[in-house]
């Protein structure tokens, strides 16, 4: 299932959501300008390298000029390909505006980046010795989705549904769409525990634990930051 734009009204212009989308696209365009060797060095400088974060790498890796902890934030703006960034930005565009509307601009930015950091740490916990770069906005966006399912469980998400050679659209409740997505990530994360790592991220190129962790932390942090407040803030 692929989500399309939802129909929930918002009362503020989601500047932070738009800004995050723009920042991700600009970084990706910069990535496209790099050669293969430069791109590899760029990822090793700015993406999370779990074994470096753990200080337990068993192989020699390119050295980053920046403290490894800073990559917990910088990695959230890196993407490994067109499908990777397109999918992430689609989900951020659909779900981010309503959560930003509830939290306000400043709290939403703090919430988003914090979810991304905690999502990366969740993935690190399950792959602390991995030398493979972990990158992408998926964990932070999963946090947005975790908050969204609490605040708008009955909201209808317009969804593309393939039926063989035909494609139709249906509106499904957010709790079903996002609940199914979370269950898929959690089960895939469990299945990946014994799977070999692959280039880019863990298990088939997808950081399932970052997704599941971000979702859970988003559901926890959202209410703490005022997700159910009747008055949004700056």
Image (cartoon, rainbow, N blue to C red):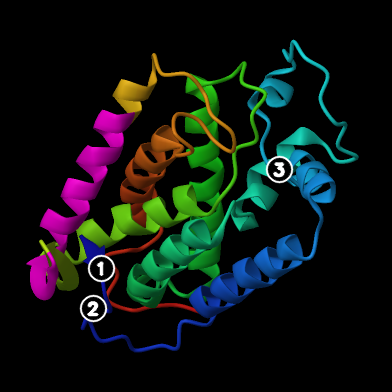
Residue at mark 3: 71
Viewer-closest of 108 and 48: 48
Task: Quote the CA–CA distance across marks 2 and 1.
Answer: 8 Å
| Quadrant of the frame with the N terminus | bottom left
Viewer-closest of 233 and 50: 50
Q: Residue at x 49, y 38 (%)?
A: 205
**Which of the numbered marks, if any, corresponds to residue 3?**
1
Residue at mark 2: 6
Q: What SS does tag 1 mark?
A: strand
Can you give x and y, in whole percent of width and height, for residue 92 in the image? 42, 67
Give yes or no for residue 102 being in the magenta stretch: no
Identify the magenta region.
Answer: 165-188
Please report contact status of discs 3 and 2: CB closer than 8 Å, yes or no: no
Q: Position of 44 compared to 111: left or right?
A: right
In the depicted structure, whether residue 10 falls above or below residue 174: below
Quarter of the image for residue 153 reads bottom left
Q: Earlier in the sequence, mark 3 or mark 1?
A: 1
């Amino acid at each position: 299932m692929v989500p399309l734009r939802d129909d929930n009204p918002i009362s503020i212009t989601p500047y932070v959501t738009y800004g995050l989308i723009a920042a991700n696209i600009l970084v990706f365009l910069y990535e496209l300008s790099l050669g293969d060797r430069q791109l590899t060095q760029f990822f090793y400088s700015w993406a999370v390298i779990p074994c470096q974060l753990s200080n337990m790498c068993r192989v020699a890796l390119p050295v980053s000029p920046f403290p490894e902890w800073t990559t917990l934030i910088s990695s959230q703006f890196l993407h490994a390909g067109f499908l990777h960034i397109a999918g992430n930005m689609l989900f951020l565009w659909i779900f981010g505006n309503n959560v930003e509307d509830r939290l306000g601009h400043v709290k939403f930015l703090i919430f988003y980046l914090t979810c991304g950091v905690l999502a990366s740490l969740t993935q690190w916990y399950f792959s602390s010795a991995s030398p493979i770069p972990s990158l992408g906005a998926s964990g932070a966006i999963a946090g947005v989705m975790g908050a969204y399912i609490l605040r708008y469980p009955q909201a209808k998400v317009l969804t593309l549904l393939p039926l063989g050679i035909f494609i139709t659209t249906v509106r499904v409740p957010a709790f079903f769409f996002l609940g199914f997505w979370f269950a898929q990530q959690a089960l895939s994360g469990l299945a990946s525990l014994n799977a070999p790592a692959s280039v880019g991220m863990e298990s088939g190129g997808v950081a399932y634990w970052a997704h599941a962790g971000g979702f859970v932390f988003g559901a926890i942090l959202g209410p703490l930051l005022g997700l159910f407040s009747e008055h949004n803030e700056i």
